[in-house]
Amino acid sequence: MEGFQPLKILSCLSVWFLFHFSTSNSYTLPDKYFINCGSPSNVSVSTQTFIGDESSHDGYKLSSGNSKAVEESTSGNSKAVDELYRTARIFRQSSSHEFDISENGTYVVRFHFFHFSSLGNLSDAHFNISAYKSPILSNFTVKNSSSSDFIPTQEFFLPVHVGKLRIDFVPFDENSFAFANAIEVFLAPPDFIPDSFVPRVSGEGQKGEYNGLLRSPLHVIHRINVGGVNIMPSNDTLLRYWIPDDDYLLINNTARNRRFNGDKLNYQKWGATPFLAPDSVYRTAKEMNINKETTLNSFNISWLFDVRKQSKHLVRLHFCDIVSPAANELTKFNLYIYSDFSYEIYPFRVIPQTAAPFYVDFVVDSDNSSLMLISVGLESDNNDSINNNQIAFLNGVEIMEVIDEVASRGHHSKRMKLFIIIGPCVGGVVLVLIILATFMFCLKRRKWMPVETTDWRLVPLYGGSSHSRTKVKNRTGSAHADFNLGLKISFSEILYATRKFNTKLMIGEGGFGKVYKGLLRNGAKVAVKRSEPGHGQGLPEFQGEIMILSKIRHQNLVPLIGYCDEGDEMILVYEFMEKGTLRDHLYSQKGESEESTVGSKLSWDQRLRICIDAARGLDYLHTGSSQAIIHRDIKSTNILLDEHYVAKVADFGLSRLDQIDQTHVTTDVKGSFGYLDPEYFRCFQLTLKSDVYSFGVVLLEVLCARPVIDHSLPREQVNLSEWAMSWQRKGKLDKIVDPLLVGKINVNCLRKYGETVEKCLQDRGVDRPSMVYVLWDLEYCLKLQNTAVVREPYEDSTSDVGLPLPVVQRLPSASLEIGDSELIHE
């Protein structure tokens, strides 16, 4: 499989390195927070002082109902690094450590665990650790310290925001306990972890780019000094441990150690910095163990690392050309991850000097083997002997697991069993559809007939089309191919599903056209949206929605089942959402039938969960792919509910795909009045924050259960957002909540909710939060609503943002059957 385009990748890396060096080089290791657990005394390690947790420490607080300080009975070695491990604090109950955070950023959070036998063996500890009550270390026990690669730390990179960082130690069960020797919490160098445009690969090869890396904690599982020895915290710029690579080398005699004996490394502003890795890493390397008889295709140097299977990992590989004799213009080799992905390492193109450190990052999806193979080697079309410039090397490896959907991992084996059962069935269905589609393409093309004369009973499901409206000229003059033949549905099948667009099956009407309930021949229950002349949206919106929905898939986005573009028809077919729109469950506009509001009213808890679901869908649109998707028409009628009241964002006809690194898109103003971003309206500049503003208006609809614009009300109440914000600024938002919710909303929850809405509705987009922060705030609101614990001052909404709660997987509603009584038969 082909690797990435080297020039494109290296160009991006050069920009990254340039910015990174200029910011990171001015970084100094902060003095907060370094905690010596279980001791009243301070301990110095390298340049840092670990403060005893029994002493006063500005900004740090230990909350524990049942903890005990313990000390090793033997004196041991007098080295400072050993002294840190002579004391520990044992936690018999859930206990929290709280840290004042004054600056947003990525923080290094490091826990020290060294077991000794005083007052019981600490190796018996069994516990979990959470940050913001979201698990980051689960089912943890201490490794055997006699192991040659034993590292007494567990390290994380956490996205942390101004306020309080709370870390909880939770014993695994009533017979277990937790402990720690020391805790470190400090701000990492600027842009230490990239957030976007990180090349993504798997066992099958290239998978595009990964974005939104900083939304999840990272757990360091391997930090390897290739070709070197152990590096202790006292010799590392960020107090890290590095271990030798020999135990991970697949075949020992393929490589030999190399050491740089020069005075100084050539750090360049577009390369790595000493904070990325210490000098000791870049001064040593493993190089190919070659001789005069060795040929180019003889071998690769390979390392095998244990990882969590079927998970995402940030893999950082460090290079420094200490092997070339003088100039390195001819030195180039391949990097391999697993066996099907290769990437050319050409040091001269990155930094045209020897002994110049640089690194590359990849997000790697591990396979089902629990092992990750990383190799370096040469490639050639012949077996010419290797010259002095043809050699592969590697200096360092870091592998960090992306902690994603932690809660779902315990059910992983159950899901795998389900996939094993469902997989063959789905494969069989797909094969049948492919055969049918191929067969139909071989038939004589049929001329489209009007509804009154079409013989819709004889055409099979997903048949071909005689004329495709999606084959049109784009702006450059080239013709679009069909967007996705696998999604095409024949007009005859649409007629069958909707009983020839029976008016009794019409369930709505919007900017695109009328919407009908339908039942496909395969039993799928669907919503059919048919374009009509004279409506505001047309072919561009039709094409845009197909293009976007065929590229994305998320549990909180309404999936596109198919489309039809025969003749003049433009029809979109979606999963049917049993409970209709969010607005249907909040209020009905004057003049509308009251049928939409018949049934049970949504509780506040249900409304919060619906908002959280919708926020997840929007966050995925903004950050879940290489191109940011701006929805552009967020409103309560475009948030649909399935039979379990799971919310899904719908209607992508106005959406825009744009590069994430663009600050804005200049475009004509489109959207729904009352939800429009005022900055977009004034400046014609559409951004991701435009969606955030519209979502803030939806949050007010959910709270107040009234239209966003209501001209029947007094002038000051016509515009919901302006009216509600006037009450919010007075601290009296409770005065305008839905009467059905009066007395049912936790006061702390309402305060946090109001603050979240206020941030979303800021006049300037730059002052609004991104959707991931809105999601965190809403999840925190749900926590506050469902807890009876009195809120502490540090939990004030102006200073606390929580990590995302685990995502609960739910089955899609499309699997429901439609009873015959629900559809009209002729």
Image (tube, rainbow, N blue to C red):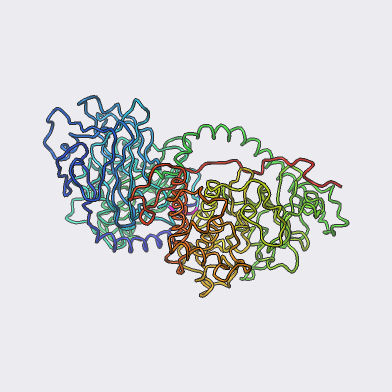
- Magenta extent: 208-212
- Height in image: 371 above or below 732? above
x and y percentages locating residue 111 in the rendered image: 28, 40
**Tally of numbered tags:** 0
Q: Is residue 310 magenta?
A: no
Q: Residue at x 36, y 50 (%)?
A: 795
Which residue of the protein is positioned furthest toward the right in this rendering? 453
Relative side of 143 to 782, left or right: left
Q: Residue at x 54, y 72 (%)?
A: 681
Q: Is residue 45 visible?
A: yes
Give 321 or 378, whichever is nearer the viewer. 321
x and y percentages locating residue 283 in the rendered image: 23, 50
x and y percentages locating residue 554 in the rendered image: 56, 49
Relative side of 747 to 230, left or right: right
Q: Is residue 374 visible?
A: no
Relative side of 519 to 355, left or right: right
Q: Residue at x 62, y 35 (%)?
A: 422
Give 291 or 478, whichever is nearer the viewer. 478
x and y percentages locating residue 794 in the rendered image: 33, 50
Q: Residue at x 38, y 45 (%)?
A: 790
